[in-house]
């Protein structure tokens, strides 16, 4: 039997890709740009609010200013870049509600992607997103 974590993150939007009907309209990866480059942000609260922290994560080749770029690229590669598929790191989190919203946008292996998720607090966030949003 699989247990669910005490605080479950609410998915505000899933990883998206262009559908075949509009694939031609999707912007291509800029010439010379890395095949996987994501802008990651962290904001306090559940609404769109000022960004508290931001980082650039580059994979293929690994780079950017993300402090855990190697681990984050490895974790995302293992799930095909799908943040929703990252395995949950079960940890004991307080029940204090202090929501935090994370988002990413950019390219994963040449495909335009975006993702946003709100969690009850930072502990719940890190149990869902591993090292990807630890910056």
Image (tube, helix red, strand yellow):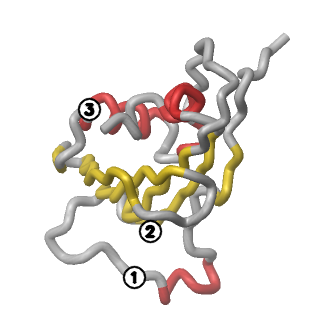
Residue 112 or residue 11, whichever sits in front = 11
What residue is pinned by disc 2? Answer: 112
x then y, percent, for residue 76: 43, 39
Q: Which mark is residue 62?
A: none
- Is the Cβ of the residue at disc 1 closer than 8 Å to that at disc 2? yes
x then y, percent, for residue 42: 43, 50
The residue lying at 44 percent from left, 57 percent from top is 104
Q: Nearer the viewer, mark 3 or mark 1?
A: 3
The residue lying at 56 percent from left, 67 percent from top is 17
What residue is pinned by disc 3? Answer: 68
Badge 1: residue crowd in 10 Å (few <14, some 14–19, many ≥20): few
Answer with mark 1 or mark 2, whichever residue precedes in sequence.
Answer: 1
Which residue sits furthest bottom? Answer: 25
- On screen, residue 103 versus residue 117, left or right, reads left
Answer with mark 2 or mark 3, whichever residue precedes in sequence.
Answer: 3
- On screen, residue 60 versus residue 73, left or right, reads left
Answer with mark 3 or mark 1, whichever residue precedes in sequence.
Answer: 1
What residue is pinned by disc 1? Answer: 27
| Element class at badge 1 | loop
Residue 32 or residue 7, whichever sits in front = 7
- Is the Cβ of the residue at disc 2 closer than 8 Å to that at disc 3? no
| Element class at badge 3 | loop
Quadrant occupied by the N terminus: top right
x then y, percent, for residue 113: 48, 63
In 3D space, how far apart are the residues under numbered discs 2 and 3 (Cα atoms)?
Answer: 22 Å
The residue lying at 39 percent from left, 38 percent from top is 132
The residue lying at 54 percent from left, 45 percent from top is 100
In 3D space, how far apart are the residues under numbered discs 3 and 1 (Cα atoms)?
Answer: 28 Å
- Is the Cβ of the residue at disc 3 closer than 8 Å to that at disc 1? no
| Element class at badge 2 | strand
Query: Which image quarter: residue 39?
Result: bottom left
């Amino acid at each position: 039997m699989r247990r669910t974590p005490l605080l479950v993150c609410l998915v505000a939007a899933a990883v998206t890709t262009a559908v075949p009907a509009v694939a031609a309209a999707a912007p291509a990866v800029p010439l010379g740009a890395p095949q996987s480059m994501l802008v990651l942000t962290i904001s306090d609260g559940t609404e769109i609010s000022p960004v508290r922290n931001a980082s650039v994560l580059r994979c293929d080749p690994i780079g950017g200013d993300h402090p855990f770029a190697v681990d984050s690229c490895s974790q995302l590669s293992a799930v095909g870049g799908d943040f929703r598929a990252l395995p949950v790191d079960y940890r004991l989190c307080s029940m204090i509600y202090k929501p935090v919203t994370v988002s990413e946008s950019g390219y994963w292996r040449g495909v335009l992607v975006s993702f946003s998720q709100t969690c009850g607090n930072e502990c719940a966030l890190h149990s869902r997103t591993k090292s990807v949003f630890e910056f």
